[in-house]
Image: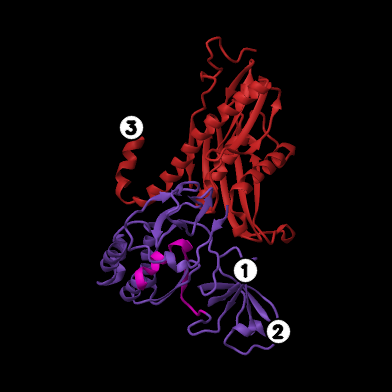
Amino acid sequence: MKLISDDGIRYDGRKVDELRPIRIEAGVLKRADGSAYVEFGKNKVLAAVYGPRECHPRHMQNPAKAIVQCKYNMIAFSVGDRKRPGPDRRSVEISKIISEALDYVVFTENFPRTSIDVYIEVLQANAGTRCAGPTAASVALADAGIPMKDLVPSVAVGKVNDQVVLDLQKEEDNYGQADLPIAMIPRTGEILLMQMDGHMTRAEFDRAIELGVGACKRIYDIQKDALARRYTVEKTEEEPAEEAPSEQEG
Amino acid sequence: MQFQKGKKRSENMNKEGQGSSREIVLPGDLLESGGRMKAGAGTYVQDGKVYAAQVGIKSVKSNFVNVIPLGGRYIPTPGDSVIGKVVDIGPSNWLVDINSPYPAPLHVNEVPWRVDFGDTARFMNVGDTLLAKVLMVDETKRVQVTMKEQGLRKLQGGQIVEISYSKVPRVIGKGGSMIQMIKNMTNTRIFVGQNGRIWLDGEIENIVFAIRAIRMIEENAQTMRLTERVKEYLESVCKPAPAEDAESR
């Protein structure tokens, strides 16, 4: 199967080091303390944050810090064949790694005995939802006003047709040779999440990290922009109300 | 690296006056790299540089960089006046919800009445609301509240609205100017708890106007000239027969 043409154009028309179009919206849900919606190409992911709130069951409380509980869930209609609802091996694993990544950035010691609950719902999946998850969740955490070190952009890098490519989409993920999702703090270079599926040589791995770090910086800017937009719109809510409809028409 | 907590919440209260910068900062934004200013509330230090830890507005005050939060949960501090709801009763205490992640027990020794053991329900029951003061908070954020102080009481009648705790200073205004104006113009009795709960009592129309004014403050908390705009609204609505004018908004 040929997923990359001879002149380096991929199945969906992207170059090897090109991201899918990304759209992030902060504060989309009214009932949650914080929320975010992320589109990563055809991926559509919604994240909501509650808390810090009283932790139940009691035995999970930590008297020294808050616990971060993340629930990653794929909706039944998020994939081609109907996904059987409910937690499965894969979603439990992804919930765990995302919880651990987010736990590192949140100042949990400020809220002893509480739990910060993060819900990630995948509305539509097209490979790389475990990266869209923390991308959305960290924006939602910031939107909830929770003190944290930084936002957590995340992206997958992979190997397809013996070439290292950025941000795999479904066909490349299914028929490619390797998949390497990473989440990081771009400012410090700390990597918070990394998994690998398939095989890469050392040189390919280094190239993949280099591509991923660059892409995370770009995603980070989009995340910050989404939050800034959310809070500046609030500031000047009254004035530009009339402009909004004309934008939709154009 | 350590998160800096505000020493006194009141430090951030009178933010209206300092119009120098109203810059919105996000977690991870660099606030100070030269070491000239110290890390204040809502910030953290890494490698000698100060970064924002929360979404908020950057403010510089007496050589401290602070981030005034735009959201988040209320965390009790000793001395805060709060409005609580009784959620459970025991033989010698009430469990009070103070709109924070931590439930606050109110012991019978901390109420102005003499309560016999097991007689707590005669004084306050589940669902009752009360004015209380945070007595103490320990390292694991175990909270205790008290009602043994002037003006603290069980609330009878009136209504309660909830706003974000971070907007309480705006509702109160500089030196209480905003809330005093609302009270005077709507002729209502209002009590604002530090935990974002507001109790109002008076004529029902007047309460409605006061609530609208409070919602207006909540929505436009970061804008300039807020007191004047709220005043304009209240003038338009309160002076002549209030009932009709309400429809214009």
| Most foreground residue, B213 or A232 | A232
Amino acid type at circle 1 is Pro
Chain at tag 2: B
As rendered, which of A217 and B170 lies closer to the eye? A217
Which of marks 2 and 1 precedes in the sequence? 1
Labels 2 and 3 positioned on one and the same chain: no
Chain letter belonging to callout 1: B
Instruction: Specify the farthest residue to the top.
Output: A6
Is disc 1 placed on a helix, strand or loop?
loop
Looking at the rendered image, the disc whose residue lies closer to the viewer, 1 or 3, is 1
- Secondary element at tag 2: loop
Image coords of residue B14 (percent x, y):
38, 66
The residue pinned by badge 1 equals B103
Determine the CA span between mark 2 and mark 3.
69 Å
For disc 3, the chain is A
Judged left or right of residue B204, residue B101 is right
Residue A249: image quadrant is top left
Q: Position of residue B70 (x, y in %)?
A: 45, 56
Q: What tint does the image give chain A?
A: red
- Residue B189 visible from this viewpoint: yes
Q: Is residue A178 left or right of residue A23?
A: right
Q: CA distance from mark 1 to mark 2?
A: 21 Å
Image coordinates for residue A98, horizontal then vertical, percent: 64, 42
In the image, which disc is placed on residue A250?
A: 3
Instruction: Tell me if mark 2 has few (under 14), some (14-19) or many (20+) residues whose alpha carbon lies within 10 angstroms of its own.
Output: few
Q: Residue at x 49, y 59 (%)?
A: B41
Residue A213 at x, y = what percent? Answer: 56, 32
Locate the C terminus of chain A by quadrant.
Answer: top left
The hue of chain B in the figure is: purple
Amino acid under disc 3: Gly
Please name the residue that numbered disc 2 is placed on. B118
Left/right of residue B229 with respect to residue B126 in the rendered view: left
